[in-house]
Amino acid sequence: MTSSNRVILASSFGAALVFGGIAAEWKPIHRGWTKFNSHFALRASFPSNQVAAALKRMCSKEYQMTVETRREGNVLQVFFWRFRLLKGDGMEMRRDAAEALERVLLCATRVALSTDAPLQFVEVKMEDALTGATVTLWRYVPDIRDSMYARMGEDEYINRLVLEVNTDGHRELSGRTPRWDVPLTMSEFLAKQVVLRTKRQSPLGLLVHEDLSQPSTLVVVIDNWQSIEEQGTQQKSKIPDFVEKISKDVLHAYRFHGFEGVILQDDRGAALRSWKL
């Protein structure tokens, strides 16, 4: 998958990078369901062995949406098809698709807050039935609870949601079998967090991806390092400090100790800096 075809965003519907206009709607939506869900979090309305079925029923009853659901370990997953997810240029989500994603996320959030299942992540995946393009989002369930009980600021909560758009879709869609992802791990989720915040907060337009092939090490690869070098030594020298700070902020915020260190690499595989955590 090329970096141009893979986009990771901070907020659910745009973060002002790609899905312009819809991001402004997320904050009032977030406030509304946070208040609403406070009524559901006090008891387990959905037993752990029924959580996937309950989510499927809720989507059907509340929004007349047909979705596939499953619980795989500590991840609650939802999969559904839509026609035409993205606009013509392939980088901006259509409003009706964003609204469908929003509704399914709302249902998944309600179920995750009202079950005795030890859920760690909620994943919602939407696939274009014509092109195979996908939009996938992940939410860390403890973040949902922290937000509901006002232990986390609104902006931070929105920033912690990970959204990924993949336009390298499957063309063979016969049978309409859900394409379930392997359940996300905490290491993968936090690596995505580091990458998306690096992209979003960088003033230099960094193109970045993560590499988890080395055990206990997060490798952050800058795909457009050659173009950064052309901007001069002053700009180039700021990037390692910038990425190091973001990685430490994200990983320390989650009190995560699965990575022993981080390596920053250029697009040719040369190490630019490494640091311990």
Image (spheres, grey):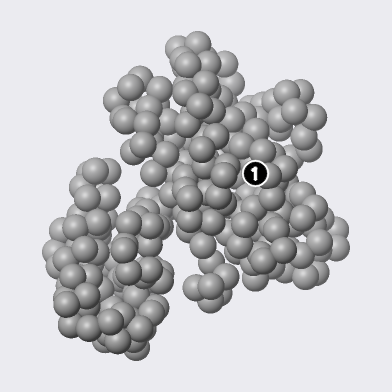
> Alpha-carbon neighbours of circle 1 within 10 Å: few (<14), some, or many (≥20)?
many
Front-most of 153 and 186? 153
**Residue at 38% of width from left, 57% of height from top?**
200
Q: Is residue 3 left or right of residue 272?
A: right
Query: Where is 106 relative to 261, above or below?
Result: above
The answer, for residue 175, to whether it is visible in the render is yes
Which x, y percent locates residue 155?
Answer: 36, 36
- 128, 178: nearer the viewer: 128
The residue located at (68%, 44%) in the rendering is 95
Q: Does 171 sit above or below residue 105?
A: below
Observer-nearest residue: 51 or 66?
A: 66
Q: Residue 241 location, x and y as percent?
A: 16, 66
Outermost residue, right side = 174
For the C terminus, the quadrant is bottom left
- Which residue is at 39% across, 78% downward? 223
Q: Amino acid at mark 1?
A: Ala
Query: Is 274 displayed left or right of 126 in the figure?
Result: left
Drawn side of residue 79 relative to residue 210, left or right = right
- Locate the N terminus by quadrant: bottom right
